[in-house]
Amino acid sequence: MPHDVIVNNIYAYKKKDKQAINHVTGHIHDVLIALRNTKTVLTIHDLVFLDNVKNPIKRFYKWLFWLYIPIKIADEVVCISYQTKEGILKKIRTDKLTVIYNAIDPIFQHHQKPFNKSKPIVLHIGTGWNKNLDRTIMALEGVPCHLRIIGKLNDHQRKLLNNNKIDFSNQCNLTDENIKEEYIKCDIVNFPSEYEGFGMPVIEGHKTGRVVITSKIQPIIEVSANAVAYVDPFNIESIKSAYLKVVEDTDYRNSLIDLGLENAKRFSVETIAKQYLDLYKKLSEK
Protein backbone atom coordinates (compact mmCIF):
# COMPACT_ATOMS: atom_id res chain seq x y z
CA MET A 1 0.00 0.00 0.00
CA PRO A 2 2.81 2.55 0.69
CA HIS A 3 3.97 1.88 -2.88
CA ASP A 4 0.50 2.86 -4.15
CA VAL A 5 0.64 6.12 -2.20
CA ILE A 6 3.96 7.03 -3.82
CA VAL A 7 2.85 6.11 -7.36
CA ASN A 8 -0.50 7.89 -7.02
CA ASN A 9 1.07 11.04 -5.64
CA ILE A 10 3.76 11.24 -8.31
CA TYR A 11 1.06 10.99 -10.98
CA ALA A 12 -1.19 13.55 -9.27
CA TYR A 13 1.71 15.97 -8.75
CA LYS A 14 2.53 15.88 -12.46
CA LYS A 15 -1.10 16.36 -13.49
CA LYS A 16 -2.25 18.97 -10.96
CA ASP A 17 -3.44 22.35 -12.19
CA LYS A 18 -2.65 25.24 -9.84
CA GLN A 19 -5.08 27.50 -11.68
CA ALA A 20 -8.03 25.10 -11.40
CA ILE A 21 -10.04 23.27 -8.76
CA ASN A 22 -8.68 19.73 -8.42
CA HIS A 23 -11.47 17.29 -7.49
CA VAL A 24 -10.67 13.78 -6.21
CA THR A 25 -13.73 11.52 -6.50
CA GLY A 26 -12.48 7.95 -6.12
CA HIS A 27 -10.88 5.89 -3.35
CA ILE A 28 -7.43 7.42 -3.94
CA HIS A 29 -7.83 10.02 -1.23
CA ASP A 30 -4.10 9.97 -0.54
CA VAL A 31 -3.35 11.95 -3.73
CA LEU A 32 -4.43 15.06 -1.83
CA ILE A 33 -0.87 15.01 -0.47
CA ALA A 34 0.41 15.92 -3.95
CA LEU A 35 -2.26 18.57 -4.42
CA ARG A 36 -1.22 20.82 -1.56
CA ASN A 37 -1.23 24.53 -2.42
CA THR A 38 -4.01 24.05 -4.97
CA LYS A 39 -7.76 24.41 -4.51
CA THR A 40 -9.13 20.94 -3.85
CA VAL A 41 -12.41 19.10 -3.36
CA LEU A 42 -12.56 15.54 -2.03
CA THR A 43 -15.64 13.33 -2.45
CA ILE A 44 -15.95 10.51 0.10
CA HIS A 45 -18.51 7.90 -0.93
CA ASP A 46 -18.52 5.72 2.17
CA LEU A 47 -16.32 4.44 4.97
CA VAL A 48 -16.29 0.77 3.98
CA PHE A 49 -12.52 1.03 3.55
CA LEU A 50 -12.35 1.46 7.34
CA ASP A 51 -15.45 -0.35 8.57
CA ASN A 52 -14.43 -3.70 7.06
CA VAL A 53 -10.78 -3.68 8.13
CA LYS A 54 -10.00 -5.91 11.12
CA ASN A 55 -6.21 -5.58 11.18
CA PRO A 56 -5.44 -2.61 13.49
CA ILE A 57 -2.27 -1.65 11.58
CA LYS A 58 -4.05 -1.58 8.22
CA ARG A 59 -6.98 0.23 9.80
CA PHE A 60 -4.69 2.96 11.18
CA TYR A 61 -2.89 3.24 7.84
CA LYS A 62 -6.16 3.77 5.99
CA TRP A 63 -7.50 6.17 8.64
CA LEU A 64 -4.32 8.25 8.29
CA PHE A 65 -3.80 8.26 4.51
CA TRP A 66 -7.39 7.86 3.26
CA LEU A 67 -9.25 9.96 5.82
CA TYR A 68 -7.32 12.15 8.28
CA ILE A 69 -4.60 13.65 6.04
CA PRO A 70 -6.83 14.06 2.94
CA ILE A 71 -9.55 15.85 4.93
CA LYS A 72 -6.98 18.13 6.58
CA ILE A 73 -5.57 19.08 3.16
CA ALA A 74 -8.82 19.41 1.16
CA ASP A 75 -10.56 22.77 0.99
CA GLU A 76 -14.00 21.18 0.72
CA VAL A 77 -15.14 17.60 1.42
CA VAL A 78 -18.30 16.19 -0.19
CA CYS A 79 -20.15 13.26 1.37
CA ILE A 80 -22.69 11.40 -0.76
CA SER A 81 -25.01 10.83 2.21
CA TYR A 82 -25.66 12.16 5.69
CA GLN A 83 -24.71 8.72 7.00
CA THR A 84 -21.23 9.13 5.53
CA LYS A 85 -20.99 12.63 7.00
CA GLU A 86 -21.99 11.42 10.46
CA GLY A 87 -19.55 8.52 10.22
CA ILE A 88 -16.68 10.87 9.40
CA LEU A 89 -17.57 13.22 12.25
CA LYS A 90 -17.33 10.30 14.66
CA LYS A 91 -13.71 9.82 13.57
CA ILE A 92 -12.51 13.37 12.80
CA ARG A 93 -13.53 16.86 13.85
CA THR A 94 -14.00 19.07 10.79
CA ASP A 95 -16.31 21.77 9.46
CA LYS A 96 -15.53 21.09 5.79
CA LEU A 97 -18.26 18.52 5.09
CA THR A 98 -21.04 19.10 2.56
CA VAL A 99 -23.62 16.49 1.51
CA ILE A 100 -24.25 16.18 -2.24
CA TYR A 101 -25.96 13.02 -3.46
CA ASN A 102 -24.85 10.92 -6.43
CA ALA A 103 -26.66 11.72 -9.66
CA ILE A 104 -28.55 9.09 -11.61
CA ASP A 105 -27.35 8.31 -15.12
CA PRO A 106 -29.63 10.05 -17.67
CA ILE A 107 -29.97 6.77 -19.60
CA PHE A 108 -32.52 5.73 -16.97
CA GLN A 109 -35.97 6.95 -17.96
CA HIS A 110 -39.56 6.12 -17.03
CA HIS A 111 -40.87 3.08 -18.95
CA GLN A 112 -44.40 1.94 -18.24
CA LYS A 113 -44.93 -1.80 -18.04
CA PRO A 114 -47.97 -3.86 -16.99
CA PHE A 115 -47.15 -5.63 -13.73
CA ASN A 116 -46.93 -9.41 -14.18
CA LYS A 117 -48.89 -10.45 -11.12
CA SER A 118 -48.90 -14.17 -11.93
CA LYS A 119 -45.11 -14.41 -12.25
CA PRO A 120 -43.25 -11.13 -11.67
CA ILE A 121 -39.61 -10.73 -12.62
CA VAL A 122 -37.60 -9.88 -9.50
CA LEU A 123 -34.38 -8.08 -10.39
CA HIS A 124 -31.52 -8.55 -7.93
CA ILE A 125 -28.38 -6.49 -8.55
CA GLY A 126 -25.14 -7.80 -7.03
CA THR A 127 -24.00 -11.06 -5.43
CA GLY A 128 -21.46 -9.81 -2.89
CA TRP A 129 -21.67 -10.41 0.86
CA ASN A 130 -23.70 -7.27 1.52
CA LYS A 131 -26.33 -7.83 -1.20
CA ASN A 132 -28.18 -10.45 0.85
CA LEU A 133 -28.81 -12.90 -1.96
CA ASP A 134 -28.99 -15.94 0.35
CA ARG A 135 -31.91 -14.56 2.36
CA THR A 136 -33.55 -13.36 -0.85
CA ILE A 137 -33.50 -16.90 -2.19
CA MET A 138 -34.93 -18.36 1.01
CA ALA A 139 -37.61 -15.65 1.19
CA LEU A 140 -38.71 -16.39 -2.38
CA GLU A 141 -39.28 -20.09 -1.73
CA GLY A 142 -42.87 -20.79 -2.75
CA VAL A 143 -43.42 -17.31 -4.21
CA PRO A 144 -44.30 -17.56 -7.94
CA CYS A 145 -41.73 -15.38 -9.69
CA HIS A 146 -38.62 -15.34 -11.84
CA LEU A 147 -35.48 -14.20 -10.02
CA ARG A 148 -33.13 -12.34 -12.36
CA ILE A 149 -29.68 -12.14 -10.76
CA ILE A 150 -26.99 -9.77 -12.04
CA GLY A 151 -23.54 -10.78 -10.81
CA LYS A 152 -21.33 -13.86 -10.54
CA LEU A 153 -22.87 -16.72 -8.54
CA ASN A 154 -20.79 -18.97 -6.33
CA ASP A 155 -21.41 -22.69 -5.80
CA HIS A 156 -23.20 -22.11 -2.48
CA GLN A 157 -25.65 -19.64 -4.07
CA ARG A 158 -26.39 -21.99 -6.97
CA LYS A 159 -27.02 -24.85 -4.55
CA LEU A 160 -29.35 -22.65 -2.50
CA LEU A 161 -31.28 -21.66 -5.64
CA ASN A 162 -31.73 -25.29 -6.64
CA ASN A 163 -32.63 -26.50 -3.14
CA ASN A 164 -35.31 -23.81 -2.81
CA LYS A 165 -36.62 -24.55 -6.34
CA ILE A 166 -36.22 -20.95 -7.50
CA ASP A 167 -36.89 -20.18 -11.15
CA PHE A 168 -33.92 -17.95 -11.96
CA SER A 169 -31.55 -16.67 -14.61
CA ASN A 170 -28.14 -15.12 -14.20
CA GLN A 171 -26.02 -12.65 -16.15
CA CYS A 172 -22.64 -11.02 -15.55
CA ASN A 173 -20.50 -8.26 -17.04
CA LEU A 174 -23.33 -6.16 -18.42
CA THR A 175 -22.91 -2.74 -20.00
CA ASP A 176 -24.76 0.28 -18.63
CA GLU A 177 -27.20 -0.06 -21.51
CA ASN A 178 -27.77 -3.73 -20.66
CA ILE A 179 -28.42 -2.83 -17.02
CA LYS A 180 -30.95 -0.22 -18.09
CA GLU A 181 -32.80 -2.89 -20.10
CA GLU A 182 -32.86 -5.20 -17.07
CA TYR A 183 -34.70 -2.53 -15.09
CA ILE A 184 -37.18 -2.03 -17.93
CA LYS A 185 -37.94 -5.76 -18.18
CA CYS A 186 -38.38 -6.39 -14.46
CA ASP A 187 -41.47 -5.96 -12.26
CA ILE A 188 -39.76 -5.63 -8.87
CA VAL A 189 -36.33 -4.22 -7.97
CA ASN A 190 -34.96 -6.25 -5.06
CA PHE A 191 -32.33 -4.54 -2.89
CA PRO A 192 -32.43 -5.91 0.70
CA SER A 193 -28.78 -5.08 1.41
CA GLU A 194 -27.07 -5.56 4.75
CA TYR A 195 -24.76 -2.58 4.11
CA GLU A 196 -24.62 0.20 1.52
CA GLY A 197 -22.71 3.41 1.01
CA PHE A 198 -25.55 4.90 -1.03
CA GLY A 199 -27.95 2.54 -2.81
CA MET A 200 -28.18 3.69 -6.44
CA PRO A 201 -30.35 0.71 -7.56
CA VAL A 202 -33.15 2.20 -5.45
CA ILE A 203 -33.05 5.41 -7.51
CA GLU A 204 -32.60 3.55 -10.80
CA GLY A 205 -35.71 1.53 -9.97
CA HIS A 206 -37.63 4.66 -9.05
CA LYS A 207 -36.63 6.46 -12.24
CA THR A 208 -37.63 3.47 -14.39
CA GLY A 209 -41.02 3.29 -12.66
CA ARG A 210 -40.59 0.00 -10.83
CA VAL A 211 -41.60 -0.90 -7.31
CA VAL A 212 -38.57 -1.27 -5.03
CA ILE A 213 -38.13 -3.61 -2.05
CA THR A 214 -35.19 -2.61 0.12
CA SER A 215 -33.70 -2.55 3.60
CA LYS A 216 -34.75 -0.19 6.35
CA ILE A 217 -31.19 0.89 7.06
CA GLN A 218 -29.20 4.05 6.48
CA PRO A 219 -28.36 5.52 4.05
CA ILE A 220 -31.08 3.71 2.09
CA ILE A 221 -33.79 5.30 4.27
CA GLU A 222 -32.32 8.70 3.45
CA VAL A 223 -32.07 7.96 -0.26
CA SER A 224 -35.42 6.19 -0.70
CA ALA A 225 -37.61 8.76 1.11
CA ASN A 226 -40.27 6.18 2.11
CA ALA A 227 -41.01 5.44 -1.56
CA VAL A 228 -40.19 1.74 -1.14
CA ALA A 229 -41.36 -1.42 0.60
CA TYR A 230 -39.02 -1.62 3.59
CA VAL A 231 -37.76 -4.91 5.02
CA ASP A 232 -35.57 -6.10 7.84
CA PRO A 233 -32.63 -7.45 5.79
CA PHE A 234 -31.81 -10.01 8.49
CA ASN A 235 -35.34 -11.44 8.68
CA ILE A 236 -36.44 -13.83 5.93
CA GLU A 237 -40.12 -13.55 6.86
CA SER A 238 -39.95 -9.76 6.64
CA ILE A 239 -38.55 -10.00 3.11
CA LYS A 240 -41.12 -12.62 2.05
CA SER A 241 -44.01 -10.52 3.44
CA ALA A 242 -42.85 -7.55 1.38
CA TYR A 243 -42.86 -9.63 -1.81
CA LEU A 244 -46.36 -10.92 -1.15
CA LYS A 245 -47.77 -7.48 -0.31
CA VAL A 246 -46.22 -5.85 -3.39
CA VAL A 247 -47.57 -8.60 -5.64
CA GLU A 248 -51.07 -8.79 -4.16
CA ASP A 249 -51.83 -5.15 -3.25
CA THR A 250 -52.14 -3.19 -6.49
CA ASP A 251 -52.92 0.16 -4.83
CA TYR A 252 -49.97 -0.16 -2.48
CA ARG A 253 -47.66 -1.10 -5.34
CA ASN A 254 -48.80 1.78 -7.56
CA SER A 255 -48.50 4.30 -4.73
CA LEU A 256 -44.87 3.30 -4.20
CA ILE A 257 -44.16 3.63 -7.91
CA ASP A 258 -45.64 7.14 -7.98
CA LEU A 259 -43.68 8.17 -4.89
CA GLY A 260 -40.52 6.70 -6.43
CA LEU A 261 -40.86 8.68 -9.64
CA GLU A 262 -41.12 11.86 -7.58
CA ASN A 263 -38.17 10.88 -5.39
CA ALA A 264 -35.93 10.28 -8.42
CA LYS A 265 -36.10 13.98 -9.30
CA ARG A 266 -33.83 14.75 -6.35
CA PHE A 267 -31.00 12.87 -8.05
CA SER A 268 -31.18 14.29 -11.58
CA VAL A 269 -27.91 15.34 -13.22
CA GLU A 270 -29.19 18.92 -13.42
CA THR A 271 -29.96 19.07 -9.68
CA ILE A 272 -26.66 17.52 -8.58
CA ALA A 273 -24.55 19.48 -11.10
CA LYS A 274 -25.96 22.76 -9.77
CA GLN A 275 -24.96 21.83 -6.24
CA TYR A 276 -21.40 21.10 -7.39
CA LEU A 277 -21.22 24.30 -9.41
CA ASP A 278 -22.33 26.26 -6.36
CA LEU A 279 -19.61 24.54 -4.33
CA TYR A 280 -16.96 25.27 -6.97
CA LYS A 281 -18.06 28.92 -7.13
CA LYS A 282 -17.81 29.23 -3.36
CA LEU A 283 -14.31 27.73 -3.41
CA SER A 284 -13.13 29.86 -6.34
CA GLU A 285 -14.12 33.03 -4.48
CA LYS A 286 -12.04 32.14 -1.42
Image (cartoon, rainbow, N blue to C red):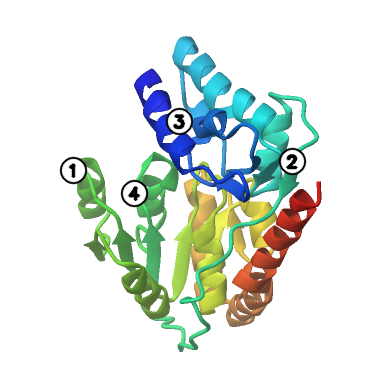
Mark 2 lies on a secondary structure that is strand
Distance Cα–Cα, label 4 vs label 1: 12 Å
How far, Cα to Cα, is label 1 from label 2?
43 Å
* Mark nearer the N terminus (1 vs 2): 2
Marked residue nearer the N-terminal end (4 or 1): 4
User: On screen, 189 above or below 154?
Assistant: below
Q: What is the crowding at mark 4: few (fewer than 14 residues within 10 Å), some, or many (at least 20)?
A: some
Q: Is residue 235 visible?
A: yes
Disc sitting over residue 97 in the figure:
2
> Marks 2 and 3: CB-CB under 8 Å?
no
Q: CA distance from mark 4 to mark 3?
A: 33 Å
Of residues 128 and 88, the one nearer the viewer is 88
Element on which disc 3 rests: helix
Q: Residues within 10 Å of mark 1 (few under 14, many from 20)?
A: few
| Identity, as a three-letter code, of the amino acid under mark 4 | Thr
Disc 1 to disc 3: CB gap under 8 Å: no
Q: Which mark is residue 155?
A: 1
Q: Reading the chain from its start, which is encountered first: label 4 or label 2? A: 2
Q: Residues within 10 Å of mark 3 (few under 14, many from 20)?
A: many
- Foreground label between 4 and 3: 3
Comparing labels 4 and 2, the label whose residue is closer to the camera: 2
Residue 19: percent from the left, percent from the top?
A: 63, 49
Is 171 located above or below residue 283 in the figure?
A: below
Dot label at residue 127: 4
Q: Could you tell me which quadrant the N terminus lies in?
A: top left
First in sequence: mark 2 vs mark 3? 3
Determine whether label 4 and label 2 are within 8 Å by CB: no
Q: Three-letter amino acid code at disc 2?
A: Leu
**Foreground: 6 or 15?**
15
